[in-house]
Amino acid sequence: MTDIPTHSTVKVTGRTRDLVILVDRGVYLLTCHWVAFVNALLLLYLLPAFAAPMLLAGGHAGTSRLLYTLYGPPVCHQLPERSFYLFGPRTTYSYEDLTAAGVELSPNTLERRRFVGDAALGYKMAFCERDLALYGGVFFFGLLFALLARKWLKPLPWWGLVLFALPIAVDGFTQLFGLRESTPELRVVTGLVMAAGGVWFAYPYVEATMLDLRKSVAAKLHLPL
């Protein structure tokens, strides 16, 4: 004897179908606007780095310190001589500049990062110069990809990515091992170059995957590509 589905069973099935359709439509929208989604996440990640010095300048030291802590090691070293400053006479200071201004900087990097600035010098951002250029560069080049290149740009080969990564590796490691001191300009440029290479390498692959997924969902829901 075949069981006859009850009214409650049919109702649950209908809701499940509606939920599946809703999820499919969400996946379809994501495949259409995935770059915007990634950039929105990047903005949410970057904004606290700007908010930390703004809050400190506005007298909200507790909240500001929390952001500096959250974005500190291992996320970013936050060294004061390698970070941008807001609300001061200059946007960058070298180690020598800071000590000449009377700032006592510890030789211990974990201690030195605790200096966040003051009213005379300005307040440092919660990301160092290179990290800000790297994440900001991914946002910027991702935007260019979405507006200008997503339909025709081919992926950068792996050896091309190595070439794009070489400047940041040379600049970073020679500085790390004390062979030389980098400059704010070099940190920004090498971060932007790395961001450009990363977007060029990864985004065309992601776009191809999203297009295949979009075709599958569009066929199921009878939606345009």
Image: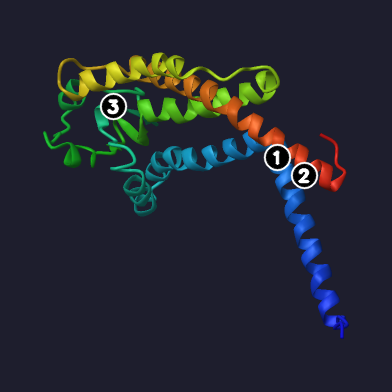
- Find disc 3 in the rendering and name its residue: 82
Distance from the alpha carbon under mark 1 to that under mark 3: 43 Å
Q: Closer to the camera: disc 1 or disc 3? A: 1
Q: Nearer the N terminus, badge 1 or badge 3? A: 3
Residue 98 image point, x, y percent = 20, 26
Q: Is residue 110 above or below residue 150?
A: below
Identify the amino acid type marked 3: Arg
Identify the amino acid type marked 2: Val
Residue 108 image point, x, y percent = 13, 37
Where disc 3 sits, the SS reads helix
- What label sits on residue 217 in the rendered view? 2
- Residues marked 2 and 1 touching at CB (< 8 Å): yes
Q: Is residue 94 visible?
A: no
- Which residue is located at x 15 percent, y 34 percent? 105
- Which residue is located at x 34 percent, y 19 percent? 168
Residue 57 image point, x, y percent = 39, 41
Q: Quadrant of residue 49?
A: top left
